[in-house]
Amino acid sequence: MKKVIFTLFLVIALSGIAFAGSFLFRGKAKESSSYETAPVKKKNIGSFILATGSVKPIIGAEVKVGARISGKVEHLYANIGDKVEKDQIIAEIEKKDLEAQVAQAEANLKAADAGIGVSKASFWPALSAETDYGFQDTRYFPQKGDNFGGLKVTMPLFNGQDLYTIKQSKAVKESTKAALEFSRVQLSYATIKAPISGVIASVTTQEGETVVAGLSAPTFVTIIDLSRLQVDAFVDETDIGRVKVGQKALFTVDTYPDKEFTGKVKAIYPKAIIQENVVNFDVVIEIDDPNSELLRPDMTTSVTIYQEERTGVLVIPRAAVIKEGPGKFVLVKQDNGTFEKKKIKTGIQSGKDIEVVSGLKEGDTIGIKRD
């Protein structure tokens, strides 16, 4: 009877142990199957900010060329897409009336010169050879006298009205010279020249049209210098604090999706741009890529601005990091297949990866809980 009881007890005990072992095994298997694993490896990573933007001409690279005088467009030498050099003539306004005004001003200047000669001839012939008007006659009064009104005379016996007439004639000449210069400037406005070198982007006036210059000059053409472009990237307010002048930037455009263009942060606009309650800041990217001639204004860009770059650092997936209070932990897989929690210190983030500063070594395997 004792043997039967002992045998029965032994069978029950072994069955319990087997059941418990099976339960534990299933528990571990279930625990293991609820995690994905990833190796701790070395990698080059960088911290960056993603933004969208567009290609724009820099300030002064897009110029609207207009007319400063009214008149009929006599000649137009510009077509869309034409390359022009600085000071190249692109249009001419009818200018016969302006040429006539210049001729009249030149005639008036000659008349003013003649008027000065007449005034000097009527003056008392006692001026010495040292006068401002070049009159020379010392036959009557060879001695030099006092300085009077800027004229050196040999005797004070002369008519003051004559001296006034000479000064008045000289003033008329100066006024006529100014009028001639003004007429020549007005004539120069009839010839429209390119203020910069570039490409004709638009033509808004046709040959034969009459333009009227008012408070705003009528635009003839728009010229863009395609060698002076930049990227305006719109960075979210949550990221703008990490953007600094001089940081490296890469960008792509839709028409060349496999080509990356290089640049760097040149400026950050202080005032935000708010659209649909989204706050962005305009970050200017200076283009320094040798293939920049492929770009055109208003192309849409996808921009990556780099803050830091690290080479050969330990990296794990960001999803593996467990935050508990101020600390960060990961689950490290042990030799027996179980996972052990271990505290780590992290560095910069790059996409789905994060740098591990301490707590792990290359070759470790970590667990990432399945969703």
Image (spheres, helix red, strand yellow):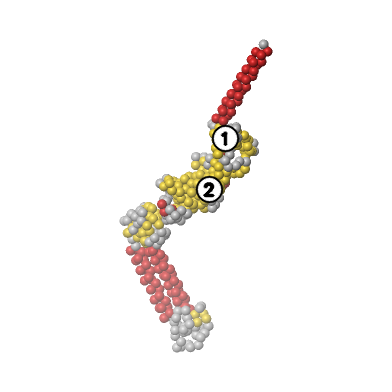
Q: Is residue 127 left or right of residue 339?
A: left
**Res. 273 visible in picture:** no
Q: Position of residue 87 (x, y in %)?
A: 40, 62
Q: Given the current orientation, which residue lies at the most extreme right position?
A: 2
Can you say which quadrant of the picture contains the C terminus? top right
Q: Given the current orientation, which residue lies at the most extreme left position?
A: 208
The residue under the point 60% across, 24% down is 21
* Residue 33, above or below 143: above
The residue that label 2 is drawn on is: 306
The residue that label 1 is drawn on is: 367
Q: Nearer the viewer, residue 33 or 126?
A: 33
Snapshot quadrant of residue 98: bottom left
The residue under the point 50% across, 46% down is 304
Q: Nearer the viewer, residue 227 or 272?
A: 227
Snapshot quadrant of residue 125: bottom left
**Res. 340 visible in picture:** yes
Q: Position of residue 67 (x, y in %)?
A: 39, 58
Snapshot quadrant of residue 191: bottom left
The residue under the point 49% across, 42% down is 275
Q: How far is mark 2 from mark 1, CA to CA?
A: 30 Å
Amino acid type, callout 1: Gly
Front disc: 2 or 1? 1
* Residue 154, above or below 282: below
